[in-house]
Image (cartoon, grey):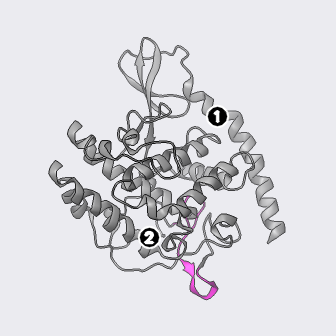
Amino acid sequence: MRLRHYWFIVCLSNAWIVFEAGHSEKDTNDSSPVECEEGSFMLNTCEERCECKKGKLTSCYRVRKDFTKMTIEDRKRYINTYKLASVHPVVKKDYEKLIALHNTGGNQAKVPEAFLPFHRWFLVEMENVLRRIDCRVTLPYWDWSKNTHHWWRGTGDEDLWNPADHGLGGDGNYTDDNCVEDGAFSKDKWLLLDVSGGGCLRRNFTKDNLLYDIDHVKKTLSLPLEEFEQFEETVRVDYHLLPHNAIGGTMMNPLIAANAPELLLHHSFMDKLWYQWQNKGDEYKNVYFPSVPFKLYGSKYYGREWIDSSNLPGQVKVLYEE
Protein backbone atom coordinates (compact mmCIF):
# COMPACT_ATOMS: atom_id res chain seq x y z
CA MET A 1 0.00 0.00 0.00
CA ARG A 2 2.79 2.44 0.84
CA LEU A 3 4.56 1.83 -2.46
CA ARG A 4 1.34 2.10 -4.43
CA HIS A 5 0.44 5.34 -2.66
CA TYR A 6 3.93 6.70 -3.38
CA TRP A 7 3.55 6.12 -7.11
CA PHE A 8 0.10 7.63 -6.98
CA ILE A 9 1.60 10.82 -5.59
CA VAL A 10 4.31 10.82 -8.25
CA CYS A 11 1.74 10.50 -11.02
CA LEU A 12 -0.41 13.26 -9.57
CA SER A 13 2.62 15.50 -9.20
CA ASN A 14 3.30 15.13 -12.90
CA ALA A 15 -0.33 15.90 -13.66
CA TRP A 16 -0.14 19.04 -11.52
CA ILE A 17 2.73 20.37 -13.62
CA VAL A 18 0.61 19.94 -16.75
CA PHE A 19 -2.35 21.69 -15.15
CA GLU A 20 -0.25 24.58 -13.91
CA ALA A 21 1.35 25.11 -17.29
CA GLY A 22 -2.00 25.54 -18.99
CA HIS A 23 -4.35 27.17 -16.47
CA SER A 24 -3.31 28.97 -13.32
CA GLU A 25 -5.15 31.34 -11.03
CA LYS A 26 -3.31 34.34 -12.42
CA ASP A 27 -5.29 33.97 -15.65
CA THR A 28 -8.45 35.18 -13.86
CA ASN A 29 -7.09 38.73 -13.74
CA ASP A 30 -6.31 38.93 -17.46
CA SER A 31 -7.74 42.26 -18.69
CA SER A 32 -6.21 42.13 -22.18
CA PRO A 33 -8.41 43.47 -25.01
CA VAL A 34 -10.71 40.88 -26.57
CA GLU A 35 -13.09 40.80 -29.48
CA CYS A 36 -16.58 40.84 -28.03
CA GLU A 37 -19.84 42.65 -28.38
CA GLU A 38 -20.40 45.44 -25.85
CA GLY A 39 -22.65 44.23 -23.05
CA SER A 40 -22.46 40.59 -24.09
CA PHE A 41 -21.32 37.76 -21.85
CA MET A 42 -18.57 35.25 -22.55
CA LEU A 43 -16.18 32.95 -20.73
CA ASN A 44 -12.61 33.93 -19.95
CA THR A 45 -9.65 31.55 -19.95
CA CYS A 46 -10.68 30.30 -16.50
CA GLU A 47 -14.23 29.68 -17.75
CA GLU A 48 -15.70 32.42 -15.60
CA ARG A 49 -18.78 34.20 -16.95
CA CYS A 50 -17.74 37.78 -17.74
CA GLU A 51 -19.35 40.87 -19.21
CA CYS A 52 -17.77 42.67 -22.18
CA LYS A 53 -17.19 46.37 -21.57
CA LYS A 54 -15.04 48.50 -23.86
CA GLY A 55 -13.34 45.47 -25.31
CA LYS A 56 -12.43 43.94 -21.94
CA LEU A 57 -13.94 41.19 -19.84
CA THR A 58 -15.12 42.48 -16.46
CA SER A 59 -17.35 41.43 -13.57
CA CYS A 60 -16.33 37.79 -13.90
CA TYR A 61 -18.29 35.15 -11.98
CA ARG A 62 -17.28 31.66 -10.98
CA VAL A 63 -20.04 29.39 -12.26
CA ARG A 64 -20.98 26.46 -10.04
CA LYS A 65 -22.85 23.68 -11.81
CA ASP A 66 -24.96 20.66 -10.98
CA PHE A 67 -22.43 17.81 -10.90
CA THR A 68 -24.85 15.40 -12.55
CA LYS A 69 -25.29 17.75 -15.53
CA MET A 70 -21.61 18.49 -16.09
CA THR A 71 -19.79 16.95 -19.03
CA ILE A 72 -17.73 13.83 -18.40
CA GLU A 73 -14.59 15.85 -19.10
CA ASP A 74 -15.47 18.54 -16.57
CA ARG A 75 -16.36 15.94 -13.95
CA LYS A 76 -13.03 14.21 -14.45
CA ARG A 77 -11.21 17.53 -14.22
CA TYR A 78 -12.89 18.37 -10.92
CA ILE A 79 -12.26 14.94 -9.37
CA ASN A 80 -8.62 14.84 -10.50
CA THR A 81 -8.01 18.35 -9.17
CA TYR A 82 -9.62 17.51 -5.83
CA LYS A 83 -7.54 14.37 -5.44
CA LEU A 84 -4.41 16.23 -6.43
CA ALA A 85 -5.00 18.96 -3.85
CA SER A 86 -5.06 16.34 -1.10
CA VAL A 87 -1.56 15.03 -1.86
CA HIS A 88 0.50 17.65 -3.68
CA PRO A 89 3.05 19.42 -1.45
CA VAL A 90 2.36 22.86 -2.95
CA VAL A 91 -1.31 22.99 -1.92
CA LYS A 92 -1.75 20.10 0.49
CA LYS A 93 -0.87 22.22 3.55
CA ASP A 94 -3.67 24.71 2.85
CA TYR A 95 -6.11 21.95 1.91
CA GLU A 96 -5.26 20.06 5.09
CA LYS A 97 -5.62 23.21 7.21
CA LEU A 98 -9.15 23.79 5.93
CA ILE A 99 -10.15 20.17 6.48
CA ALA A 100 -8.80 20.25 10.03
CA LEU A 101 -10.56 23.55 10.75
CA HIS A 102 -13.92 22.20 9.61
CA ASN A 103 -13.40 18.99 11.59
CA THR A 104 -12.56 20.80 14.83
CA GLY A 105 -14.95 23.73 14.49
CA GLY A 106 -18.02 21.89 13.33
CA ASN A 107 -20.14 22.59 16.40
CA GLN A 108 -19.33 26.30 16.40
CA ALA A 109 -20.12 26.51 12.69
CA LYS A 110 -23.51 24.81 13.07
CA VAL A 111 -25.20 27.50 15.12
CA PRO A 112 -27.81 29.73 13.40
CA GLU A 113 -25.53 32.78 13.62
CA ALA A 114 -22.78 31.10 11.61
CA PHE A 115 -23.85 28.07 9.58
CA LEU A 116 -24.67 29.72 6.26
CA PRO A 117 -21.91 32.37 6.08
CA PHE A 118 -19.26 30.07 7.58
CA HIS A 119 -19.84 27.44 4.93
CA ARG A 120 -19.96 30.04 2.17
CA TRP A 121 -16.53 31.18 3.34
CA PHE A 122 -15.31 27.60 3.65
CA LEU A 123 -16.46 26.72 0.14
CA VAL A 124 -14.67 29.70 -1.40
CA GLU A 125 -11.48 28.90 0.51
CA MET A 126 -11.57 25.29 -0.69
CA GLU A 127 -12.35 26.45 -4.19
CA ASN A 128 -9.36 28.82 -4.07
CA VAL A 129 -7.09 25.90 -3.24
CA LEU A 130 -8.38 23.86 -6.18
CA ARG A 131 -8.08 26.83 -8.53
CA ARG A 132 -4.40 27.15 -7.73
CA ILE A 133 -4.10 23.88 -9.61
CA ASP A 134 -6.61 24.58 -12.37
CA CYS A 135 -8.45 27.90 -12.44
CA ARG A 136 -11.24 26.40 -14.55
CA VAL A 137 -12.43 24.42 -11.55
CA THR A 138 -15.36 25.56 -9.44
CA LEU A 139 -17.20 23.56 -6.81
CA PRO A 140 -20.11 21.58 -8.22
CA TYR A 141 -23.26 20.96 -6.25
CA TRP A 142 -25.33 17.83 -5.73
CA ASP A 143 -29.07 18.50 -5.84
CA TRP A 144 -30.26 15.35 -4.11
CA SER A 145 -33.84 16.72 -3.92
CA LYS A 146 -34.38 15.80 -7.60
CA ASN A 147 -33.51 12.15 -7.00
CA THR A 148 -34.86 11.22 -3.59
CA HIS A 149 -36.26 7.81 -4.63
CA HIS A 150 -32.97 6.32 -5.83
CA TRP A 151 -30.36 8.84 -4.71
CA TRP A 152 -27.81 6.03 -4.18
CA ARG A 153 -27.92 4.84 -7.82
CA GLY A 154 -24.57 4.66 -9.61
CA THR A 155 -25.40 2.83 -12.83
CA GLY A 156 -26.02 5.87 -15.05
CA ASP A 157 -23.26 8.03 -16.50
CA GLU A 158 -24.88 11.06 -14.88
CA ASP A 159 -25.09 9.48 -11.41
CA LEU A 160 -22.98 10.97 -8.65
CA TRP A 161 -21.96 7.53 -7.38
CA ASN A 162 -20.85 6.17 -10.75
CA PRO A 163 -17.83 3.83 -10.32
CA ALA A 164 -15.98 5.23 -13.36
CA ASP A 165 -13.37 7.99 -13.09
CA HIS A 166 -16.02 10.68 -13.57
CA GLY A 167 -17.99 9.62 -10.45
CA LEU A 168 -17.39 9.41 -6.71
CA GLY A 169 -17.69 5.63 -6.50
CA GLY A 170 -20.42 3.89 -4.58
CA ASP A 171 -21.29 2.33 -1.24
CA GLY A 172 -18.68 0.82 1.05
CA ASN A 173 -18.05 -2.88 1.52
CA TYR A 174 -19.69 -3.90 4.79
CA THR A 175 -17.32 -6.89 5.04
CA ASP A 176 -14.32 -4.55 4.88
CA ASP A 177 -15.15 -1.86 7.45
CA ASN A 178 -17.36 -0.10 4.89
CA CYS A 179 -14.36 0.97 2.80
CA VAL A 180 -15.22 2.27 -0.67
CA GLU A 181 -13.76 -0.16 -3.20
CA ASP A 182 -14.72 1.34 -6.55
CA GLY A 183 -14.48 4.68 -8.32
CA ALA A 184 -11.98 7.49 -8.08
CA PHE A 185 -11.91 7.39 -4.27
CA SER A 186 -11.54 3.66 -3.72
CA LYS A 187 -9.22 2.53 -0.97
CA ASP A 188 -6.44 1.63 -3.40
CA LYS A 189 -6.55 5.05 -5.10
CA TRP A 190 -7.12 7.59 -2.35
CA LEU A 191 -6.86 7.87 1.44
CA LEU A 192 -8.14 10.24 4.08
CA LEU A 193 -5.69 12.78 5.47
CA ASP A 194 -3.87 12.01 8.70
CA VAL A 195 -5.81 14.87 10.37
CA SER A 196 -8.94 12.84 9.60
CA GLY A 197 -7.48 9.62 10.93
CA GLY A 198 -6.14 8.32 7.63
CA GLY A 199 -7.32 5.08 6.12
CA CYS A 200 -10.02 4.52 3.54
CA LEU A 201 -13.07 6.57 2.70
CA ARG A 202 -16.09 4.84 4.25
CA ARG A 203 -19.74 4.80 3.24
CA ASN A 204 -22.70 2.89 4.59
CA PHE A 205 -25.69 3.90 2.49
CA THR A 206 -29.13 3.87 4.06
CA LYS A 207 -31.03 3.00 0.91
CA ASP A 208 -34.32 4.61 1.82
CA ASN A 209 -36.07 7.47 0.07
CA LEU A 210 -34.92 10.87 1.28
CA LEU A 211 -37.64 12.77 3.13
CA TYR A 212 -37.31 16.14 1.43
CA ASP A 213 -37.99 16.12 -2.29
CA ILE A 214 -37.97 18.91 -4.84
CA ASP A 215 -41.49 20.04 -3.87
CA HIS A 216 -40.42 20.38 -0.25
CA VAL A 217 -37.42 22.44 -1.33
CA LYS A 218 -39.65 24.72 -3.42
CA LYS A 219 -41.90 25.32 -0.41
CA THR A 220 -38.89 26.18 1.70
CA LEU A 221 -37.60 28.63 -0.91
CA SER A 222 -41.03 30.26 -1.03
CA LEU A 223 -40.99 31.16 2.67
CA PRO A 224 -41.48 34.91 3.20
CA LEU A 225 -38.91 37.28 4.66
CA GLU A 226 -40.39 37.20 8.16
CA GLU A 227 -39.88 33.42 8.26
CA PHE A 228 -36.12 33.53 7.68
CA GLU A 229 -35.48 31.62 10.91
CA GLN A 230 -37.67 28.78 9.62
CA PHE A 231 -35.81 28.81 6.30
CA GLU A 232 -32.42 28.79 8.01
CA GLU A 233 -33.33 26.00 10.41
CA THR A 234 -34.75 23.83 7.63
CA VAL A 235 -31.53 24.16 5.63
CA ARG A 236 -29.17 23.83 8.60
CA VAL A 237 -30.91 20.96 10.36
CA ASP A 238 -33.22 19.05 8.02
CA TYR A 239 -31.51 19.41 4.66
CA HIS A 240 -27.98 19.47 6.01
CA LEU A 241 -28.16 16.39 8.23
CA LEU A 242 -30.20 14.20 5.90
CA PRO A 243 -27.46 13.24 3.37
CA HIS A 244 -24.81 13.03 6.09
CA ASN A 245 -26.83 10.35 7.81
CA ALA A 246 -28.00 8.61 4.63
CA ILE A 247 -24.47 8.29 3.22
CA GLY A 248 -23.04 7.21 6.55
CA GLY A 249 -19.43 6.22 7.12
CA THR A 250 -17.01 9.14 6.90
CA MET A 251 -19.80 11.63 6.19
CA MET A 252 -21.63 10.66 9.37
CA ASN A 253 -18.67 11.39 11.65
CA PRO A 254 -18.47 15.17 12.27
CA LEU A 255 -14.83 14.89 13.33
CA ILE A 256 -13.74 13.70 9.88
CA ALA A 257 -16.66 14.42 7.52
CA ALA A 258 -14.92 17.36 5.86
CA ASN A 259 -12.48 14.94 4.23
CA ALA A 260 -15.25 13.11 2.35
CA PRO A 261 -15.31 14.41 -1.25
CA GLU A 262 -19.12 14.43 -1.27
CA LEU A 263 -19.22 16.99 1.54
CA LEU A 264 -18.27 19.90 -0.72
CA LEU A 265 -20.95 18.97 -3.26
CA HIS A 266 -23.56 18.71 -0.53
CA HIS A 267 -22.62 22.03 1.07
CA SER A 268 -22.53 23.72 -2.31
CA PHE A 269 -26.18 22.73 -2.64
CA MET A 270 -26.92 24.17 0.81
CA ASP A 271 -25.23 27.42 -0.26
CA LYS A 272 -27.19 27.41 -3.53
CA LEU A 273 -30.46 27.26 -1.58
CA TRP A 274 -29.42 30.31 0.44
CA TYR A 275 -28.31 32.01 -2.79
CA GLN A 276 -31.72 31.35 -4.38
CA TRP A 277 -33.59 32.61 -1.32
CA GLN A 278 -31.44 35.76 -1.23
CA ASN A 279 -32.10 36.47 -4.90
CA LYS A 280 -35.75 37.14 -4.10
CA GLY A 281 -34.78 40.70 -3.14
CA ASP A 282 -32.30 42.91 -1.28
CA GLU A 283 -34.23 42.53 1.96
CA TYR A 284 -33.84 38.75 1.67
CA LYS A 285 -30.14 39.09 0.99
CA ASN A 286 -29.40 41.24 4.00
CA VAL A 287 -31.63 39.75 6.66
CA TYR A 288 -30.25 38.62 10.05
CA PHE A 289 -26.47 38.27 9.57
CA PRO A 290 -25.48 41.97 9.51
CA SER A 291 -26.38 42.12 13.20
CA VAL A 292 -24.24 39.12 14.26
CA PRO A 293 -21.31 40.63 16.23
CA PHE A 294 -18.68 37.86 16.16
CA LYS A 295 -16.27 36.55 13.55
CA LEU A 296 -16.68 33.25 11.77
CA TYR A 297 -14.78 30.37 13.37
CA GLY A 298 -11.21 30.08 12.11
CA SER A 299 -11.44 33.14 9.88
CA LYS A 300 -10.82 36.89 10.02
CA TYR A 301 -14.29 37.67 8.70
CA TYR A 302 -17.70 38.51 10.06
CA GLY A 303 -20.69 36.71 8.65
CA ARG A 304 -22.00 39.94 7.13
CA GLU A 305 -19.00 39.96 4.77
CA TRP A 306 -20.19 36.70 3.18
CA ILE A 307 -23.75 37.69 2.42
CA ASP A 308 -23.52 38.92 -1.17
CA SER A 309 -22.30 36.20 -3.57
CA SER A 310 -21.68 38.85 -6.22
CA ASN A 311 -19.32 40.76 -3.92
CA LEU A 312 -17.38 38.39 -1.68
CA PRO A 313 -13.98 39.09 -0.08
CA GLY A 314 -11.03 38.73 -2.43
CA GLN A 315 -13.11 40.14 -5.31
CA VAL A 316 -14.81 36.75 -5.69
CA LYS A 317 -18.14 36.55 -7.48
CA VAL A 318 -20.16 33.34 -7.54
CA LEU A 319 -23.31 32.29 -9.36
CA TYR A 320 -25.10 28.96 -9.52
CA GLU A 321 -26.23 27.45 -12.78
CA GLU A 322 -29.38 25.34 -12.87
The image quadrant that residue 64 belongs to is top left
Residue drawn 54% across the image and 45% down it: 125
Residue drawn 74% across the image and 52% down it: 12
Of residues 55 and 241, which is closer to you in this image?
Answer: 241
Residue drawn 53% across the image and 67% down it: 257
Of mark 2 and mark 1, the one earlier in the sequence is: 1
Q: Amino acid at mark 1?
A: Ser
Q: Residues within 10 Å of mark 1 (few under 14, many from 20)?
A: some
Q: Secondary structure at mark 2?
A: helix
Q: Secondary structure at mark 1?
A: loop
| Residue 310 locus on image (x, y percent) | 38, 34
Give the magenta-colored segment's residue range: 162-178
Which residue is disc 2 drawn over? 244
Of residues 43 and 123, which is closer to you in this image?
Answer: 123
Residue 167 magenta-drawn? Answer: yes
Q: Amino acid at mark 2?
A: His
Could you say which disc has been placed on residue 24 in the image?
Answer: 1
